Amino acid sequence: MVPVYEGSISKAARFMKLASVTSLIGASAAVPFYFTGDSEVPSAARMVLALTTVGMTGSSTLLAAWALKPYITTLHVVANEDDTSDSSIEVDADTPLLVETLTFLAKPYTRLVFPEQLASASVPMASWVVRQPSEALVAKADGILAQINKNRKKGDQIRLAQKGDKLYAFTQGQISALMAKIIAVSPAQEQ
């Protein structure tokens, strides 16, 4: 595998997801303490305070999860072992790519995708929407995934990207030559 792209805020995105989930867990764990002890505050007011705290923390956690779900932390070209430099790798519409994003709990989630599957996204926080692969690409992906996954645990296996998956890569700045080739051969060619 040859690295092509690393998201500029990958570490910050991982930290933000972990911090937001941790704050939601902390706020939820604190709810019982709103109702303990002697206080002049009525139970209804305590309930409103508890629900507001959990609701606000939960909504910020969901917003962070939604915004960062398509964010590509790393992108690699699956290449022959002989291909080690950007210049020796040919990129076309059926070049296999490994795209890593983050799960809700900030764990890496890697999928196989081909540039041919990348359609321009018209939704916020996404560069591409994955299209349904052709039967030929599915067959090619099955062979690649069998090779990649042969020594992986079942829960850690890489899968083919699904139709409708959204991906975001910041490509307006300086990018690698391979990333430029990927963008050029995808149907979502950026101008």
Image (tube, helix red, strand yellow):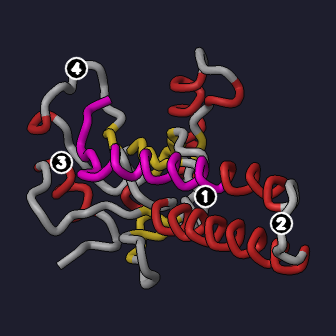
The crowding category of the residue bearing disc 3, from other C-alpha atoms within 10 Å (few below 14, some 14 to 19, many at least 20), is: many
Q: Tag 2 or tag 1, which sits nearer the N-term?
A: 2
Name the mark nearer the viewer: 1 or 4. Answer: 1
Label 2 sits on a secondary structure element that is loop
Q: Is residue 135 magenta?
A: no
> Which residue, given by chain and number where applicable, does mark 2 sit on?
39
Q: Position of residue 61 (x, y in %)?
A: 58, 63
Crowd rating for badge 2 (residues with CA inside 10 Å; few <14, some 14–19, many 20+): few
For disc 1, the marked residue is: 162
Q: Nearer the viewer, mark 1 or mark 2?
A: 2
13 vs 83, nearest the viewer? 13
Q: Amino acid at mark 3?
A: Leu
Q: Nearer the viewer, mark 3 or mark 2?
A: 2
Residue drawn at x 60%, y 58% as measured from the top left: 162
How many numbered marks have been drawn onto this rendered protein structure? 4
Mark 1 vs 4, N-terminal side:
4
Tag 3's secondary structure?
A: helix
Comes first in the chain, label 4 or label 3: 4
Sequence order check, earlier mark of 2 and 4: 2
Q: Which residue is mark 3?
A: 178
- Tell me residue 79's x, y (percent): 31, 31
Q: Are marks 2 and 4 in contact (CB under 8 Å)?
A: no
Residue found 59% across the figure and 53% down from its top: 23
Q: Residues within 10 Å of mark 1 (few under 14, many from 20)?
A: some
Residue at 44% of width from left, 53% of height from top?
16
Foreground pick, 74 / 35: 35
Sequence-first disc among 1 and 3: 1
The amino acid type, in three-letter code, at marker 1 is Gln
Q: Are marks 1 and 3 in contact (CB under 8 Å)?
A: no
The residue indicated by pointer 4 is 82
Foreground residue among 36 and 154: 36
